[in-house]
Image: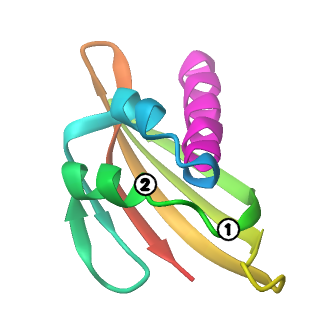
Amino acid sequence: MSNDIDALTQLNKDYVDSVQNGDVKRFDEILAQDFYCSNPDKSLVDRAGFLKQTAVPVTIKNLTAHDVKIRILGNFAIIHATTSYTTADGKDANGRYTDCWAKQNGRWLAVSAHVSR
């Protein structure tokens, strides 16, 4: 289990860093083919839509995850966390996310995300 915690901790960091940096390539590596994301605007996007929105230049800075909780349930994991960041106009803001991961063929892949601000 500790290897899975280590792997998911790194994947969570990669995920947050990829949001901050618009890293479509890394997301392409860690998202399951059937990935979906609920966005803060209440829209639901599939994998292709998520990669497309990730490619749009990022306007926030200093995105950081806090209070990360990783729960492993067999070959399924849920990550809950809060975020802090700086908006384009320089204001401090925060949010929350829940990411779901499934272990497929020995690899953890993100299968679902829910983001709120």
SS at mark 2? helix
Query: Which amino acid type is marked by label 2?
Result: Thr
Query: Which amino acid type is marked by label 1?
Result: Thr
Indicate whether residue 3 is drawn in magenta: yes
Q: What numbered label is drawn on residue 54?
A: 2
Position of residue 31 in the picture relative to residue 65 (left or right): left
Q: Residue at x 68, y 69 (%)?
A: 60
Q: Residue at x 33, y 13 (%)?
A: 106
Residue 101 drawn above or below residue 74: below
The local crowd at label 1, few if under 14, some if 14 to 19, many if 20 or more residues have their Cα within 10 Å, is some
Q: Nearer the viewer, residue 29 or 96?
A: 29
The local crowd at label 2, few if under 14, some if 14 to 19, many if 20 or more residues have their Cα within 10 Å, is some
In which quadrant of the rendered view does residue 86 lie?
bottom right
Residue 94 drawn above or below residue 65: below
Indicate whether residue 42 is drawn in magenta: no
Q: Main secondary structure of the magenta part?
A: helix
Q: Quadrant of the C terminus?
A: bottom right
Q: For the magenta stretch, what is the residue range?
A: 1-18
Q: Quadrant of the N terminus?
A: top right
Mark 1 highlights which residue? 82
Q: Nearer the viewer, residue 41 or 88?
A: 88
Residue 106 drawn above or below residue 47: above
SS at mark 1? strand
